Image (cartoon, rainbow, N blue to C red):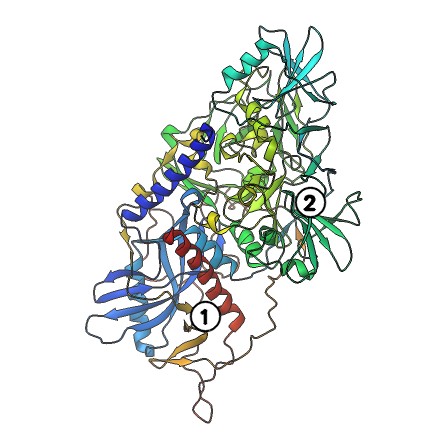
Amino acid sequence: MKPLFQTAHLLKNYIRALSFFLWCAAGHAYEWPQEVDYRDGEITIYQPQPEAIERDAIIARSALSIQFHDADEPVFGVAWFTARVTTDRALDQATFTDIHIDRASWPDAQDLQEQSLSQAIERAFSDTAMHMKLSDLTASLAANQKAHDSLNEIDNTPPRVIFREELAVLLLFDGQPRFSAVEKTRYERALNTAMVVVKDTQNQRLYLTNGSAWYKSIDPLGPWTVTDNPPRDLVQMIEDADQEETNSVADAPTIVTAIEPTELIVSTGPPSWTSLDGGQLLYVQNTETPWIRDLNTGNVYVQLSGRWYRATSEKGPWVFVRGDKLPDSFARIPPASDIGGVRSSVAGTPEAEEAVADAQIPQTAAIDRSEAFLTVNYDGRPDFKAIKGTSVAYALNTDAQVLRINDTYYAVDNGVWFFAKDARGPWQVADSVPDEDIASIPPSAPVYNTTHVHIYQSTPSVVYVGYTPGYLWSFNYYGVPVYGTGWYYPPYIGRVYYPRTPTWGFHVGYNPWLGWNYGVSWGAPFYRAGVMWHGGWGRGYHPGRCCGGFYGGGYRHNDITINTGDIHIGRTTSIGRHTLAQAEKTKPYQKTNLYRNDANKRRIVDQASIHKDLKQTRQSVNKKNNLYADPNGRVARHDGNQWHLRDNNKWRPVDGNKPIKPDNGRAPLPDKLVNPQSRPAALPNGNHHTRPAVHPETGHHVRPAVKPGNGHHTMPPVKPTARPAPKPQPKAFPQSQGGGHQAATFNHAHMDRHMQARQRMSSGKMATFKR
């Protein structure tokens, strides 16, 4: 019989899948192409190819066609559009509203027809909502291979790395062990660890438990030995708190202790080195950790919190290696291999590009002002610490993230900004924050992640907000995602203990389907017991509420994966080193959406109700999703292995031109590091931006303000004249002397990436449907 907490986890996945099914069944198309009716015919739009996302605005291009009622053949074209994007990572859903056609190209039309065709699609989409799978959006955005700036000031100093050739668990203290009395008992609990460590004050003995097995020691730093005779009253307290069944551990793992940033790498016996196809790399098979040897140099690589470290042997010393400086053989690791999951941490691979693209896409929500409340508790009087080089100070003696800026107080709670005139409140949901001041917070500050929470716009009743993965401590660094800033954030120690978010100690790995996960393996029951039992915390203290999880945003009880056999069982979901097995691809998309957690249940307005008055596109069931828009405004079709371009009302094959420049499959990398800056400058009058006035890359104006009352943007009947004139687009391609079609500027590499991204996501969906 499966433990109840595992059953609850499966039930949660079922509910997610059911919710997505009901959303689709409600008439929302999410496959492509999609259609919308027009007065004189029908418009078909093919899967958008996003070019940029700025805050909650997306700029994309799409191939499309218009089938007029009185015409035999459709007219094909390309449209660039700007839209507001709302997202739900838990449901793998993205919705485009407030769609504005920026410009269009019509290779089938005469000059006089182009304006009327563009006006037709502008009118058709101005009051329409389009839906798309968020995973498709991410893959398409990654296909652009644009260079992305890397966050400066990340600390990549390696932690202490400990190897054990037996089942072992890391008992990590945040500094020297500190204890607090458990009310009405003779016991004290260690506060600065995620596990249950209890001291009996009568005999000074210490006990540690995972809810099933018990250990004892005379020193919190060990050694720890298994005991069959823990105090009965202590066992009863833990059992009363732990209402869920716990798997018994036949061979209790060894306890390894540490008081500094540490990672524990465990193998079941001596490392079992296994060769990959190609023979250039070996990896350790009997471990959860990405642990690789490069045969050309003999160097050993391990991956910790998304970062690579290299040494000549497991004894160290360890040196940080950027994701774009790895041996070329890492990029050739087969995706379906046992360590295919590490490709997300190898710059230039499709998996890494999609992970980097995912970091640009916000998780959005609409907040009901009347239901958004916040209470902040302090240990004594509010105590603030100034952040050097900024006008910002943050509260020390609270588990909330509270900022003081120019005598006003701002707090972020589960992705929602609040403000108050006093540090104790009362708190109201904010519809503006001082963007420039917040953007100046450096990664060395424990509140740095608040720079990734945004307010987009507001109405008298609703505030539209969102956060990017940086709020959950995921950052892009030279073409790959890394977890945590690497900085050590000292805890607050007073009458209570408030920890800050750690980078190290929880064996964090990235999985493209689930995002960041904690690979605590056999340590999971220990952490679960630590969360379930509140003894010794007192005064309502709980360990961190920044991002819905333990220690300010990581470990969450509901997301634990318990191994029940060999240590590598279940590794495809819990650890970043492993491939996303086919069985996992059929599971529901499970990335975190904080706006769906308990803290936000009452705050959130169902965005479907906001969009209910909009027209909905429908899926076109009889058309292939094989039309693309190339960057020059031409309509391209991919059939088999051949590209065709639309020219003079015909599809003409593109000659076998080579890519414009050699394409090695790697994304361009940033030329320089950038200082943290996630917000645009404030308006001259001090008001906050609802949207950037001009997109920094395209120069397009994003859109006008929202219409009062319904939250929709008003759309001008005529395209604003302030928009830049469209670039001249080729009307027809030059013919060779022999009449053959020439397409010297067709970028095969760019278009192939878009085609492959579509096909890769489509193959994953087919696996889901077949199941």
1 or 2: tag closer to the N-terminus: 2
Residue at point 53%, 36% (across, down):
561
Q: Residue 235 at x, y = what percent? A: 57, 14
Q: What is the quadrant of residue 382 in the picture? A: top right
Asked if the residue at tag 2 contacts the one at tag 1, i.e. Cβ–Cβ closer than 8 Å, the answer is: no
Badge 1 element: loop
Q: Is residue 549 left or right of residue 207?
A: left
Residue 445 higher or lower than 135, as above or below: above
Q: Position of residue 636 (x, y in %)?
A: 41, 73
Q: Where is residue 165 drawn, in percent x and y?
A: 71, 38
**Which of the two residues, 704 or 219, is positioned nearer the viewer here?**
219
Q: Quadrant of the N terminus?
A: top left
Q: Residue at x 69, y 29 (%)?
A: 254
- For disc 1, the neighbor class at 10 Å (few under 14, some 14 to 19, many from 20) is many
- Residue furthest to the left in view is 70
Residue 153, numbered label = 2
Vertical arrangement, residue 298 with respect to residue 708, above or below = below
Front residue (pair 154, 514):
514
Q: Which mark is residue 72?
A: none
Of all residues, the one furthest to the bottom in this rendering is 737
- Residue 407: in sight, yes or no? no
Instruction: Identify the residue at horizontal 56%, vertical 37% (top origin).
Output: 450
Which picture quadrant has residue 216?
top right
Task: Work out whether 376 lies above or below 316.
Answer: above
Specify the label residue 630 is tagged with: 1
